[in-house]
Amino acid sequence: RWQPPGGLPCAQGSSPGGCHRRRTPARSCTARSRPRGGPRSSTRTASHYSVHTTMAALGAAIRLGQPALGARGRAVPARVSLRGAPLLRRGRSLSAAFRADGASTSSPRAVLEDVTTRKETSAAESTPAPQEEDIFSLRFPGKYVAEESEEGLTDYSDMPEHLKERNRILTPWPVCRLELKKSFGYTDAQLDAFEQLSDEDLQRAYEMMLICRDFENECAGAYMQGKIRGFMHLDNGQETIPALLADQLTKNDIKYSFYRDHTHAIASGVDPGAIMAELYGKDGGTCRGTGGSMHVYDKPTHFQGGWALVAEQLAYAVGAARSIMMDKKLGYPGKLAFRNKMNKSEDKDDRICVVFVGEGGAQNGRMAECLNAAAKEDLPLLFVVIDNGRAINTFTQDVAANQAVYRMGEHYGVPGTLVDGQNLTDVLKVGRAVMHHVRTKGPAILQVHTFRFNGHSPADPEHERNRKPEKRWARAEADPIKIFEASAEFTRGVGEEAAAACKERAAAVVQAALDFADASPDPPPSLAAELEYPDPVTTDYAAREPVGGLAEAAELTERVVPAAALATVRERIATLQQQAVESGLSIGDAVNLAILEEMLRDPTTTIHAEDLQAGSSYNIPAGTQQAFSTVRACDEIIDEGHFIGKALGEAMNNYRPIVELMNANFGIYGIAELSSAGNTYATTGGQFKMPMTVIGAGGTAPNQSLGAEHSQPFHAYIMGIPGLKICTAARPEAAYGLAKSMIRDNGPGVLLLPVKMMKIKGAPMSTDFFLPLHKATYLAKASDERVEANKAVTVLTYLHGVKEAQDAVAQVGSGYGVDLIELTSLKPLDMDTIRESLARTHRLIILDESTRSGGVGATISARVGEEAFDLLDQPVRRCVHKRRAPRRACPPACYYALRRTGRNNFGATELARSCARAGGRPCGGGCAECVGAVWCAQVVHGGRAGALLHGHREDGGEAVLRPGGSDQGRGALGCHCPEAQRIRLEQTTARAGAPRTNSPPSRTPVNTSQDDYSLSALARPATDHGAHSEQTSRPSPLLFAPDLCSCMYCPTVNEQRVGQKK
């Protein structure tokens, strides 16, 4: 039996009363061996498999050339497989690593004795400094794997499973010093300063840990009592992290947390009573009860969330860190008070941004993107990785190959380090060093290895592998409060008397928080409506000035922007303004003019885009970077979600970012960020406005062969996001006026443009005007004569549908009246304008550039049915591609979806038929003389038959030919038969003589379903003449004009059919 002289000390420190684990007499925790296959000793508990015996014995024993002995006398495997090892290849022998470079054989044991006993030694008695190659033996946790060694295969089967998976680590300060010197470039003198922890420092940290523990315990009780509803996530076991925050962060530092945010908010200075009231859903909460447990925000302390989507906060924090950088470089635009404070202070602006993420969330691709962005601009950003070994409840190492998150920044030049989160003093010392680096140099990563005592949330069943045994072990063996109370630092810096006072104060703080939450009133019922949009619809954007006024904004711009660049951008603006008045602009140039004007006027306006230097695809951001440098005009990596997130962080910190998407469909990458942008104003209780504008060219672009991923109805995807304003512009003047207004609006907005019309020059227009963000626009209006004659129809459309509808109106001619309305505001929807038009025409067509189910037209149709049903004389007609598969790039598919001018234009056909219904001939249906047909779809759509719907056979009988060979159903598209004329006369007389009432006129129900697979469905009226045979016995209220009769013997129809076949 071998035993190190004097025994091996407990790796977590000995107390005057003995080992902190078992309260044994004052002696070291020694390891005993047994012959292979011999009886096992029962003198050790499962806890002694923890790292204080296993790793310590491993490090010292290998160096001395002796067998490594673990708990119960079991030999520790000579090879340890550790994933993501910083200094050791996977599977490489630790003994080989220790022997490398001729390291001293006494180093590991000396390190362990010096660090774990926590004894002050004189310079003469100090042990040798640890060598660089020794670091990993004590640094990184891993999966212990029994492997074949020189002594044979180690029997490791009796170790508890959760400790095989994950154990506590050691990060003794001397070893941390080595890594901080190497990775962060610190000197010994600097590290000596970080090491100094006063009694006051330790007492404040201890009290913060107690407050956080008591607060979370009370939250658990309130949740069980039903006072806290919804999701809740507790932080027990990780209290050293808020202790570090309270020790190092200031009120002006920006903090971004995730859904486990209670203790982070408390440590950042947020009132615990307001936090508890927020959890209760009370009006006195930090967000007036609108955020809840996962969304704690507090503007005065710059605590900016509380974000529930895993890793989404990373990009927001990059944007916040950019705001700090821009403040310094741009002279604090819009922050006059802060600028004056900085000018008077001798200290530099050393604010930082801290963002928290779990080790599971750090595997998200956003981490790499944000490391790149932070490194590229040397942003003052600290990534705090809370490594509790669980991605929700799954062992992270089961799903992640790299757990050394602190080394993820090496490729970007971002240093990082790892610290034992159960040891308060190590966390404070290492955390101080890392935060100092962020304040003075640039970004860094701090990975804190912890154990979470609770499940992911109280609602989780915790059936995951080894979760419950791990929790029981962690509460008993890895409690940071107990470990600190058993340490020498506690005895020296706190003591029993001060500890009692700390506990009393902590209990009082938490009790006061509970009392405040109980007494706080519920939010008023009107709160939700108040928090929909930051700006009311009556906002005058022309009168809105930059924060601080126009004079201050102009002074800052003149001071920051080089004179030559300023002259160039002013010249470009003047050129575009002159061109707009004389000959007109394209949509892309119109938006570019609006952006340049606003960026020149307001120094808080920024822009993010791909290919920005070259002006992107449609010239929208052209000239911005040349004028305003990379500080305000950022060329971005190709990931829209990343830079939409950066813009969100800037918007929360008093900037007005613009995001140009190149193609709006690429915004699918950033739907999570757009969702959060829309929700932020309401979720924060109105604290944080979101002046962010997203601009993109999109739409389904009929017959342009753009393919599925460039032809998505992105506008339909985002219609359901609360708080998001969505506008469209199919004309340069609309694009210009809406862009100007949206940039000045204090809420998030999306401006969508037609992708295939971006470079088409429009008519001459004026400049320096603003359009409302909640109103639709009349492009044409039916004359009073046509309205009186009951020959008018309302057409709603947007994007490419505007041109299609204008072409259709031209084809219909002057015989019918059309109210053509461009939906320049999809959200909020301008129902006032729609009702106004329907009160005149009583008929509605929606030319919709989205899907039949869940599309924009579906939303409008539903609202019209709910709010304006009494104004309708017939069902709403939606002209929409009934997509059941992605839109293909082949022209026939696009042609089928929306036929263009010259090829039986879809818009013209539907518009003409609806106008005809207003004053033309009715179809009685089912009469012997009725003959109706539709030309065959086979000509344009892959051979699908859709030919004759209803007509006569040669023998005088009725012939009904349906797609697929069906011969069921009767009905006609329209004819001149006596029955049809009789019905038309009755309906016209009734309509002319009866005054309109609030009740809808009596009408026979009509089946308006359509086939989804043939052009016949697009070419015929709303009545389906083949789906149900019983409908043919009912008179149809849909009226047709004689000149549009689809009777197969009609000369007009025959001429059309011949032309179509050709």
Image (cartoon, rainbow, N blue to C red):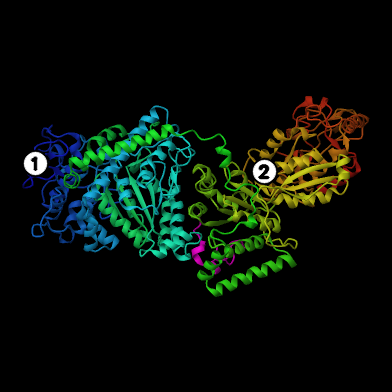
Q: Position of residue 754 (x, y in %)?
A: 67, 54
Q: Is residue 567 above or below residue 704?
A: below
User: The disc labelled 1 sits on which kind of residue?
Assistant: Arg
Q: Are marks 2 and 1 in contact (CB under 8 Å)?
A: no
Q: Is residue 788 above or below residue 459?
A: below
Number of residues whose C-alpha sits closer than 10 Å to that of mark 2, classed few (under 14), some (14–19) or many (20 or more): many
> For the residue labelled by badge 2, is the local secondary structure a helix, a strand or a loop?
loop
Front one among 430 and 8? 430
Front one among 456 and 741? 741
Residue in the image at 60% along x and 70% along y? 569
Which quadrant, please, contains the N terminus?
top left
Q: Is residue 381 above or below residue 712?
A: below
> Marks 2/1: CA distance?
77 Å
Q: Is residue 462 visible?
A: no
Left or right: where 325 falls relative to 772? left
Dot in front, 2 or 1 = 2
Q: Magenta stretch: give its range.
A: 612-639
Q: Position of residue 653 (x, y in %)?
A: 48, 54
Residue in the image at 11% along x and 59% along y? 123
Residue in the image at 30% along x and 32% along y? 468
Q: Is residue 125 visible?
A: yes
Left or right: where 902 falls relative to 789? left
Number of residues whose C-alpha sits closer than 10 Å to that of mark 1, classed few (under 14), some (14–19) or many (20 or more): some
Residue 655 is tagged as none
Check if residue 573 falls in the magenta segment: no
User: The disc labelled 2 sits on which kind of residue?
Assistant: Leu
Sequence-first tag of 2 and 1 = 1
> For the residue labelled by badge 1, is the local secondary structure a helix, a strand or a loop?
loop
Check if residue 621 falls in the magenta segment: yes
State the image quarter where residue 1022 is shown: top right
Which residue in the protein does label 2 denote? 829
Residue 27 is tagged as 1
